[in-house]
Amino acid sequence: MPWFRSLFGAVLLAGACSTASDTPADPLTLNFGKGDNASWRALNDGVMGGRSIGVVDYSRKTMTWAGTVSLENNGGFSSVRSEWGTRDLSAFESVTLRCRTTTGEADTFTLTMETARQWWLPYWKANFEAAAEWQEVTLPFSELKKSSAITGDLPKLWAWGALDDIERIGLMKYDGTAGDFGLEVDWMRFNPRSDLRN
């Protein structure tokens, strides 16, 4: 069954999953915390000469990513990324995050899904706002945008890179502002398309 091998591979390569999905109609949930999905790592603008700081810490049940974004020296972003590994997300229509900020104030973040390992090639993205209190935020895949580190957002006619070939998933703080940020994530759940649900 090709779809089972693809989905099972996505679970392994993403880190760890709460339960193995038996069919494409089952949600795929990534639970963060020590001993489960604790493989995501920080990637900051220092790779481009920037001075932003971002660190990742795991508790028993959550992942906390926090730091300070600096616009100095052509910087301006911090991110946390999963390990590399091909993931087939074509059977899903949205992703839901249970999260909250750690600064006591609402803040804006970006979900990223890369379709290539070359940094200059386009990737999928969606912005979302996290509140200071725990909440579930759902991002429909129909509202995803394509963007590139070189050109910025791309027109909808750009069709390169499909959801059946996602190489890495991540979260970014990249909104043109400087300052402290913090995001705590309990879990991330990919929700199956309505036409595949039982």
Image (cartoon, helix red, strand yellow):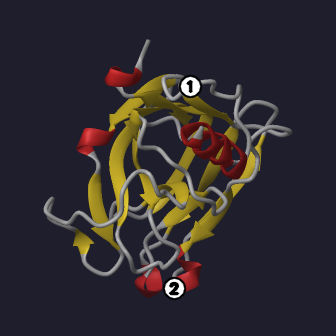
**Total marks placed:** 2
Amino acid at the residue labelled 2:
Met
The residue identified by callout 1 is 23
Q: Nearer the viewer, mark 2 or mark 1?
A: 1
- The vertical placement of 51 against 26, above or below, is below
Q: Which of the image's four quarters has the N terminus?
A: top right
Residue situated furthest top in the rendering: 198
Indicate the secondary structure of the residue bearing disc 1.
loop
Cα–Cα span, label 2 and label 1: 42 Å
The location of residue 39, given as percent across then percent down, is 74, 53
Q: Residue at x 60, y 68 (%)?
A: 43
The location of residue 58, given as percent across then percent down, is 77, 43
Left/right placement of residue 24 relative to residue 156 reads right
Left/right placement of residue 52 relative to residue 177 reads right
Dot 2 or dot 1, earlier in sequence: 1
The residue identified by callout 2 is 48
Q: Which of the image's four quarters has the C terminus?
A: top left
- The vertical placement of 185 against 18, above or below, is below
Q: Residue at x 66, y 47 (%)?
A: 9
Relative depth, front residue between 7 and 146: 7
Relative depth, front residue between 68 and 48: 48
- The vertical placement of 132 against 122, above or below, is above
Residue situated furthest front in the rendering: 1
Indicate the secondary structure of the residue bearing disc 2.
helix
Q: Residue at x 59, y 46 (%)?
A: 6
Relative depth, front residue between 98 and 67: 98
- Mark 1: give few (<14), some (14-19) or many (20+) Cα within 10 Å: some
- The vertical placement of 21 against 54, above or below, is above
Amino acid at the residue labelled 1:
Thr
Q: Residue at x 41, y 84 (%)?
A: 74
